[in-house]
Image: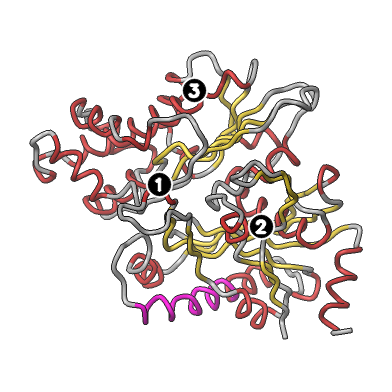
């Protein structure tokens, strides 16, 4: 037997595995590194978050990623180079974190690498007559991470989901019900990253009630991009800029009329769709020019857009639950105006920070990928329905041995 396969088989039999989960989102601000102890599999999965750190990208690294992320035209040479380069950067950051934690690489069983999404393209967003298939692309090659760190690496999690008719997002839904279902409480797990998404997690006393997950539209992406464009800041800290502006009702209404927000089914999106160009087009549609709008007013407007569309999507599906409690994670959880407006729009639904479930809300997505990797190693897969309604067990991720 190949020694690497033998080691993999032994790893699958362990009672508990030390897995490093990685997440680098569309904000391009850095890499979340979560060291998790994961035991069991499937419904018997338990996980503890032992260490967590975010390693910031340098300005040069951020600019290199911006050149190829969520843009239609790029140099293929740059995509090829960054596919390898970002893997080297992530591997270096992992080794730095382990050194800071005084943990040897040999103590880690596996790395679960999400990679860096550079384009997300659901079939609904195709504007031509090409075959209507979902597609998504993450860079950061798992073989390079494994070779540099010496640690088994599982990566490219989204492709199997897409291969069976899914959109490759939101991936958290595969794990949310395993880890966060409560005996009595109906929960809605809301994550506000660049894009907003939520998962409805029925209580364990409602085994026949199905979970539901969807993206809601823009979370932080439009806020961040406009703040970066006009104020040379990475984000709107404490919503100071948005609070200083006034919501432009005509622009807001035109944005809300976008067809993406209609329909009640599950769907995904990305900053490719909700871009600064999208904002400029909406402004043009009502006979105004992009440059004529005060920057602080436009930031107030897109903040309101995120709040309204997140709350609207949850309200449309809240009837699937009774007495639900919403737990919020992601960067948007730190935006006080956004959280205030979401809470107001949701009416009587209780809104809490995800930390009340005992896990750092900033670490949630990295932890999710650690559990996805654990299921690939030791489980039978996640419940999944194909586009033709067939039920199956889905294993996600590709395995890279260090050598």
- List the residue tagged with mark 3: 316
| View extreme (top): residue | 348
- List the residue tagged with mark 1: 124
- The one nearer the camera, 375 or 146, is 375
Where residue 263 sits: x, y (%)?
43, 30
Q: Is 383 left or right of 217, judged from the image as shown? A: right
Structural distance between the alpha carbons of marks 2 and 1: 34 Å
Structural distance between the alpha carbons of marks 3 and 1: 21 Å
Per the image, label 1 sits on a secondary structure element best described as helix
Classify the position of the N terminus by image quarter: bottom right
Crowd class of label 1 (few under 14; some 14 to 19; many from 20; radius 10 Å): few
- Residue shown at the point (52%, 43%) measured from the top left: 330
- List the residue tagged with mark 2: 34
Is residue 86 on the magenta stretch? Answer: yes
- Residue shown at the point (68%, 23%) measured from the top left: 186
Q: Mark 3 or 1, which is nearer the eye?
A: 1
């Amino acid at each position: 037997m190949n020694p690497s396969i033998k080691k993999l088989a032994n790893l699958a039999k362990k009672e508990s595995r030390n897995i490093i989960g990685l997440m680098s989102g569309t904000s391009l601000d850095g890499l979340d590194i979560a060291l998790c102890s994961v035991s069991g599999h499937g419904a018997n999965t338990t996980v503890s978050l032992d260490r967590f750190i975010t390693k910031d990208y340098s300005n040069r690294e951020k600019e290199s990623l911006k050149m190829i992320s969520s843009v239609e035209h790029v140099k293929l040479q740059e995509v090829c180079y960054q596919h390898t380069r970002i893997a080297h950067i992530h591997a270096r950051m992992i080794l730095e974190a382990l050194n800071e934690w005084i943990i040897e690489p040999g103590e880690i069983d596996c790395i679960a690498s999400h990679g860096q999404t550079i384009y997300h393209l659901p079939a609904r967003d195709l504007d031509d007559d090409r075959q209507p298939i979902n597609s998504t692309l993450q860079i950061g090659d798992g073989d390079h991470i494994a070779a540099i760190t010496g640690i088994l690496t599982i990566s490219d999690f989204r492709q199997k989901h897409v291969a069976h008719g899914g959109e490759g997002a939101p991936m958290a839904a595969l794990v949310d019900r395993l880890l966060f279902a409560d005996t009595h409480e109906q929960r809605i797990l809301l994550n506000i990253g660049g894009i907003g998404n939520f998962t409805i997690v029925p209580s364990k006393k409602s085994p026949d009630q199905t979970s539901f997950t969807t993206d809601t539209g823009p979370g932080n992406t439009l806020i961040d991009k406009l703040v970066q464009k006009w104020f040379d800041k990475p984000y709107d800290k404490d919503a100071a800029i948005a609070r200083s502006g006034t919501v432009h009702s005509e622009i807001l209404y035109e944005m809300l009329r976008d067809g993406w927000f209609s329909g009640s089914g599950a769907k995904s999106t990305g900053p490719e769709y909700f871009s600064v160009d999208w904002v400029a087009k909406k402004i043009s549609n009502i006979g105004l020019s992009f440059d004529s709008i005060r920057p602080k007013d436009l930031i107030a407007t897109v903040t309101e857009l995120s709040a309204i569309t997140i709350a609207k999507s949850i309200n449309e599906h809240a009837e699937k639950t009774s007495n639900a409690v919403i737990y919020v994670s992601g960067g948007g959880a730190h935006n006080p105006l956004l959280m205030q407006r979401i809470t107001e729009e949701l009416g009587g639904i209780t809104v809490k920070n995800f930390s009340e479930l005992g896990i750092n809300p900033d670490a949630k997505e990295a932890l999710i990928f650690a559990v996805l990797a654990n299921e690939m190693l030791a489980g039978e897969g996640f419940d999944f329905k194909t586009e033709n309604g067939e039920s199956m067990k889905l294993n996600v991720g590709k395995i890279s041995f260090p050598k």
